[in-house]
Image (spheres, rainbow, N blue to C red):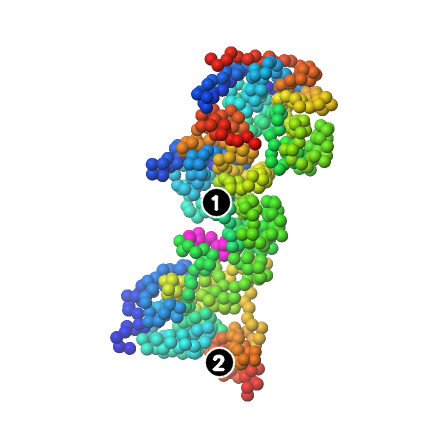
Amino acid sequence: MIGYNFAYLDEQTKRMIRRALLKAVAIPGHQVPFGSREMPLPYGWGTGGIQVTAAVLGRQDVLKVIDQGADDTTNAVSIRRFFARTAGVATTTHTAEATVIQTRHRIPEQALREDQIIVYQVPQPEPLSKLEPSRAETRRMHALAEYGPMHVKLYEDITRYGHIAISYDYPVMVNGRYLMSPSPIPAFDNPKLDMMPALQLFGAGREKRIYAIPPYTEVRSLDFDDHPFRATRAPHACGLCGATDSYLDEVVTDDRGGRLFVCSDTDHCETRRAAGHVGEQAMAAE
Amino acid sequence: MLQARGLAKHFTLHLRGGVRLDVLRDVDLEVRAGECVALAGPSGAGKSTLLRALYGNYRVDGGEIRIRHEGAMVDIASAAPREVVAVRARTLGYVSQFLRVVPRVSALDIVAEAVREASPEEARARAAALLRRLNIPTRLHALPPATFSGGEQQRVNLARGFIGDHPVLLLDEPTASLDGANRDIVVEMIGAAKARGVAIVGIFHDTAVRDAVADRLLHVNPLQDAA
Amino acid sequence: MDETLLSARGLSLSFGPVTALADVDAELWPGEVLAIVGESGSGKTTLLNVLSGRVAADAGVVWYRDPAGRLQDVHAMPAPALRALHRSDWGFVHQNPRDNLRMNVSAGGNVGERLMAQGARHYGRIREEASAWLQQVEIDPSRMDDMPRTFSGGMLQRLQIARTLVTHPRLVFMDEPTGGLDVSVQARLLDLIRTLVARLGIAVVLVTHDLAVARLLAQRVMVMQRGRVVEQGLTDQVLDDPQHPYTQLLVSSVLQA
């Protein structure tokens, strides 16, 4: 596109972001400040993720963008089109075909590979923010690995609800050292973070922080010995493809209480249906 | 067991323009195991001051107070505070005229706390037995002694002082507020302690008690008024 | 027992023209309770903060003998080591329990925090331990899941003590632990502190303006005036036979009940 540099950001900015990314990869789970730029969309729409994607994108890359697992929502469509126009890169909705995947609030169901990069959009990078309002203090807590208060929060959950009542943005320990927010992905996705072959990058635009998990890094969800972490999903099969192991969205279908559980990962669902899997709902519709 | 030489003590009252009161000068005292020495002299002569000095409660200005503590002689007058604490814990007991009440602690526990080298259950059992011997009825044992009569408080205090079984015991008017029957029990207890080899220094206002327990008298004479 | 747990030499600190500490020495042996008494502004709380490494002095040194028997220069320790010390081997009891407690966390969570900070990861055992400690400080364990804001002032202070002692510290700093409480509540708390400290053999540096508190809890006392230690020694000796004019004034100013 004329008048813009490749992938919108100027090269100096990209270099600055890449330096932050290198540092982030070198210290897994540690939040690195970066000079977040104004982007042509508001905070909360993925400005952090977009800047990271812009910094890592090359001309040969194939980009996939998902929002809550779906390729066809406004946010995903806008960002995909943004890079198609400013970088001219190929885009796809197929997880297997993509080399860079920018995501908001999900990890694709299909296991990622070493030659892929996943970029997470992060609203609040600080996992301790709800426990400790002072930025200076949370930095000190990270520096000294003082994570007792986080466990106190989990303790309180079990005491109050009988289980750890965190269904998304479930805190993790990265490489046995840093406490990290995995961004608001469902706790269901947490096990995928662990020992993932793909490089995982996290960008928070408003909070101006970047962090990363290098490939094959240990990522543990916090828990207690007698209350171990459990990845939960709605106890249904996908109404469209019949999958019983994927993360489901609940869709209200009418005003008489009718509802439908479907895969939140639209590509996963379509791929399965193309392969001949049929869910109950889809069967009834035929 | 206890050997004091050349004790001197004065008080400087800074709040009254630095008035100096000389109370003790050149006091010598020696007490052997199983011996009871009574301090005699008119009131205000410094008997209580001497007794408190022996305990380390008052600081002396001169002289030494040597006490046999676990085989070695310790000078209370010059020992570090924590040495004095150790001597008091294991060697040197003191029964004051008045019980210093600890809020909320029962009579039984006040006494049981002073038992040495015993399980809490055994300490309480021994404390209860001694309190009963001193005619403190069992129904009072669980109460804090703040509301007890003077005589009852004094007997709790005696029980606390005697139960520690210290080799050296200092008694300040132990029978002052007791009736005849209880006085006799205390005389008996002092006699038994002497028989066990306890060295005792006491102030006994009651001459009958004094004659019954003391082997010797040490006369403490008033010094001239402020020099 | 022949080695000091904490020893300080030549501590001095000024805040502008105000001398908070002037060449103060202090020593503490294991299991000993040392009271620092004096009026407000005498420097006693400042001394407590310097001894515990919370405030740096202009001059002087504070040595602490760690559980391995090594002497540590408290003010030269790296921050992580000092904070770890404060979380485990040391405790700090504040006058206002709200300064230490997490008011939006249950009583059990407050007590369990130091255990979790030390790596305890068994919910059931953390609760057992918290329950046992609540009992020790005379809080009904059925209140374990209640929020501290539903507790009385005396209960809050006892909760703070349970939270502090749960890691079995060897040394606890206390800043007016009974200040701001009703007299009857004070008596109960004092008795509790006295019993726990004696049973657990904890060494305590206690700051108080209340001589009765010092007499009840401490074997030794240091009297401070305008940043200087004017007198020190056995508690009963200092209080019954005070030598320094300032101590005599303090002792004679106490109301006899």
Name the chain letter of the residue that bears numbered label 1. Answer: C
Quadrant of residue B221 within the rendered picture = top right
Q: Amino acid at mark 1?
A: Leu
Q: CA distance from mark 2 to mark 1?
A: 56 Å
Instruction: Look at the image and tell me whether residue C116 can be seen.
Output: no
- What residue occupies the far bottom of the structure in this picture? A286
Q: Which mark is residue C245?
A: none
User: Vertically, is A12 above or below B8?
Assistant: below
Q: Position of residue A11 (x, y in %)?
A: 28, 68
> In the rendered image, which quarter contains the C terminus of chain A?
bottom right
Quadrant of residue B29 within the rendered picture = top right
Q: Which residue is found at the position 60% from the left and 36% from the top?
A: B103
Q: Position of residue A153 (x, y in %)?
A: 52, 57
Quadrant of residue A42 within the rendered picture = bottom left
| Residue C50 located within the stretch drawn in magenta | no
Q: Which residue is found at the position 57% from the left and 59% from the top?
A: A160
- What residue occupies the far left of the structure in this picture? A3
> In the rendered image, which quarter contains the N terminus of chain A?
bottom left
Instruction: Look at the image and tell me whether residue B176 can be seen.
Output: yes
Q: Which residue is found at the position 68% from the left and 37% from the top?
A: B142
Q: Amino acid at mark 2?
A: Thr
Q: What secondary structure is marked by label 1? A: helix
Residue ID for mark 2: A271
Q: What secondary structure is marked by label 2? A: helix
User: Vertically, is C109 above or below A55?
Assistant: above
Name the chain letter of the residue that bears numbered label 2. Answer: A
Q: Position of residue C180 (x, y in %)?
A: 51, 42
Residue ID for mark 1: C85
Q: Which residue is found at the position 52% from the left and 38% from the top?
A: C204
- Tell me which segment is drawn in magenta: A137-151
